[in-house]
Amino acid sequence: MTYRNIKVTANAAVARITLSRPDKLNSLDEATMIELHSAVDSIANDPTFRVMAIAGEGRAFCAGQDLADPAMQTVGSTPPDIGTHVERYFKPLVLKLQSLPMPTVAAVHGLAAGGGASLALACDVVVAAKSAYFLQAFSKIGLTPDTGSTWFLTHRVGIARAMGLALFADKLPAEKAAEWGLIWQAIEDADFSASIEALLERLASMPTKAMVRTRQLMLAAAVHSLEEQLSMEATFIRELGWRQDYQEGVRAFTEKRQPDFRGN
């Protein structure tokens, strides 16, 4: 597929998707969502990739849904069916990100708002420049949060903070987001690019299958009883114990060297 609104690049085992509508703060119109689905599917089906990153071009990570998109416009006296749009594009994209066969990283700078914030939060690791901020702006236009925002916020920062963010639509600076546990790290702007590259390189050298299973365990913990979680852990440990990366990890430990994981 030829991409116009995103850029897809690869460097060895690292795949990168860059939202590329800088004049629109990388807001998400229908065409961009179609491209994102195609890119994520392509990366998911390529076994050479061991980590995927999402970033934005220009001044922002992503301003969320593009309200100027024809799909958001009233036609005659008929208002748009926003729910169908969310079901068709945003819901499956979040679910795809949460089931990719590799760890995912969101590199957030500038604004991450609405569905753009959720796009970042759907990734396994969210790292933001200290000047970045997150915004749940739905109440300003008479909507409820979508794209998983209510799930991500309540699970990560608790219902009190989630309600405050959703109702008042105040900016949440990156440092506060890290302090609250919404994201992994807030990094000095001057060090941001280099830190992201180092993080991606590190993840690409780690045991990919184990990291994916770790994600699945973490997500399942929200709905499992302790007994169910213990059983799931045992199942995954059994599976991973038969894999080459585990054998290499044990050899490296006993030989006092860095492991050479291959993602197998």
Image (spheres, rainbow, N blue to C red):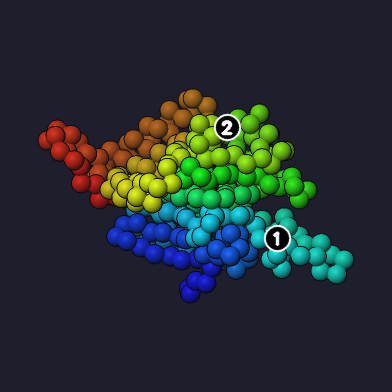
The residue wearing badge 1 is 67
Q: Quadrant of residue 14?
A: bottom left
Q: Residue at x 81, y 69 (%)?
A: 75
Number of numbered discs on residues = 2
Residue 101 lies, with reference to residue 156, above or below; the image says below
Q: Residue at x 57, y 49 (%)?
A: 112
Q: Residue at x 76, y 50 (%)?
A: 141
* Label at residue 157: 2
Q: Amino acid at mark 2?
A: Val
144 lies left or right of 263: right
* Label at residue 95: none
Q: Quadrant of residue 78?
A: bottom right
Q: Is residue 129 visible to us here?
A: yes
Residue 130 lies, with reference to residue 49, above or below; the image says above
As rendered, which of 183 and 99 lies closer to the eye?
183
Circle 2 crowding by C-alpha within 10 Å: few under 14, some 14–19, many from 20? some
Q: Amino acid at mark 1?
A: Leu
As rendered, which of 59 and 33 lies closer to the eye?
59
Residue 64: x %, y % from top left: 62, 54
Q: Is residue 208 visible to us here?
A: no
Q: Residue furthest top?
A: 226
Residue 167: x %, y % from top left: 72, 38
Separation of marks 1 and 2 at Cα, in angstroms: 28 Å
Q: Earlier in the sequence, mark 1 or mark 2?
A: 1
